[in-house]
Image (tube, grey):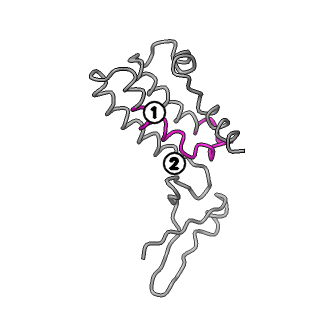
Amino acid sequence: MKSEVIWISSRHTVSTRGRPVIQIGKDTISATNKARLLGVLISTYLTFDQHVTSVSGQCFYQLRQLRSVHQSLDTESTTTLIRAFVSSRVDYCCSLLIGSPRSVTDKLQCVLNAAARVITNTKKYESGLSRILHHDLYWLDVTERIQFRVAVTV
């Protein structure tokens, strides 16, 4: 049987009562710390920290792969590949992150900054990255992307 149960509650409730166990026939299903629903990792405290960490890890993997073949691609092709493999992952279900603390959104902002550096072939500590993001690539910051997605949905 492939079933997954997540118990969502406050940190205090989990520490005092523990997680429930469900018995169905001979099978026992224990509550997990996280569950994946439509590609989004949901933790027991609804913080989305694990989801953002997973997404940023996948994006950095794709950026490392793209950086290795960057010399054989033109800027337009690199931009297209980054939009397909990186930006789409950052944007997927980002409206769930509305109201998240800056520590969560900063991880995704680092991904976008690294993607912009791959496209423009700039080094990590070169100045002008904000100008490149906004004026050359026409990208919004992560918090602005989240607000835009929510506004479009509403």
Image position of 106 with respect to 18: above or below: above
Residue 52 lies, in percent from the top left, at 52, 43
Q: Residue at x 66, y 64 (%)?
A: 13
Label 1 Cα neighbours within 10 Å, binned few <14 / some 14-19 / many ≥20? some
Give the residue number, with chain letter if any, for mark 1.
83
Label 1's element? helix
Residue 66 lies, in percent from the top left, at 33, 30
Q: Looking at the image, which is closer to me, 59 or 11? A: 59
Label of residue 51 in the image:
2
Note whether residue 9 is visible.
yes
Specify the quadrant that holds the N terminus. Answer: bottom left
Residue 94 lies, in percent from the top left, at 58, 43
Q: Earlier in the sequence, mark 1 or mark 2?
A: 2
Main SS, magenta region, reads: helix
Q: Residue at x 63, y 44 (%)?
A: 95
Q: Nearer the viewer, mark 1 or mark 2?
A: 1
Label of residue 37 in the image:
none
Q: Amino acid at mark 1?
A: Arg
Q: Please say whether residue 34 is one of the residues in the magenta stretch.
A: no
Specify the quadrant that holds the C terminus. Answer: top right
Residue 93 lies, in percent from the top left, at 57, 46
Q: Is residue 48 left or right of residue 1?
A: right
Image position of 112 with respect to 71: above or below: below
Q: Please say whether residue 91 is one of the residues in the magenta stretch.
A: yes
Q: Is residue 58 left or right of residue 131?
A: left
Q: Looking at the image, which is closer to me, 19 or 123? A: 123
Label 2's element? helix
Magenta region, residue range: 81-104
Image position of 113 with respect to 42: above or below: above
Q: Quadrant of residue 77?
A: top left
Q: Amino acid at mark 2?
A: His
